[in-house]
Image (spheres, helix red, strand yellow):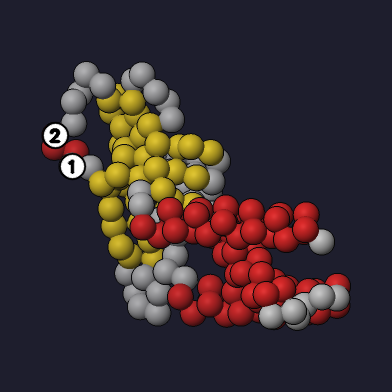
Amino acid sequence: MKHLNLSIYIIFVFTVIIILLNRFTPFYIADYRVHFFFLFFAASSFMIIIGHLFKKLRSNQSIIFTFIIVGTLCLLKAFFTWEGDWKTQTLLFRNINDNNKTINFQLSAKRFSFGYKKRIVEIYHLAPFVEWTTDVDTLYIDKSKWEKLDLQLNEIGLPVEH
């Protein structure tokens, strides 16, 4: 049981750190499914830790029931608060020295209203679903470090042929 408790604490700390980084820093989880995964495991591990502290959630049935309840609550939270992911419409520039760095024009749908939020950001791709985003002003770009692309992308991220 000690190994289970230690692993639950490790899962809780790791997932909460990822969620807090996503919320309060330029670290951005670009896929809603991955974000839901971290939210679900952070909330579930927290509930299991609380249950163990109060001498509850000792059986496998109660832990499975807790997963179902937390999963349902996370789905409801996601449905009512999701603002839409940022989707790249145009790849404006690519860094000459590092192909993982790009400057993108992105749109995000506004929830329960018509229209989009817009932004231009420098993105450093850390993993397929994780990015480091920084707002950038394209007027002050060092042209010796950036290659101009102006590449339009479709809804799945592939270049649009004209």
How far from the left and from the top, in percent, is residue 15?
57, 56
How far from the left and from the top, in percent, is residue 36?
58, 63
The quarter of the image holding the N terminus is bottom right
The quarter of the image holding the C terminus is top left
Tell me where residue 40 sits by quadrant: bottom right
* Amino acid marked by disc 1: Asp
**One can see residue 117 in this view:** yes
How many other residues sit within 10 Å of disc 1, few (<14), some (14-19) or many (≥20)? few
Q: Which mark is residue 155?
A: none
Q: Is residue 100 left or right of residue 133?
A: right
Whole-Å distance between the Cαs marked 2 and 1? 6 Å
Q: Mark 1 falls on what kind of element?
A: loop
Tell me where residue 146 sits by quadrant: top left
The residue under label 1 is 137
The residue under label 2 is 140
Residue at the image position 44 percent from the left and 65 percent from the top:
84
Above or below: residue 41 compared with residue 72: above
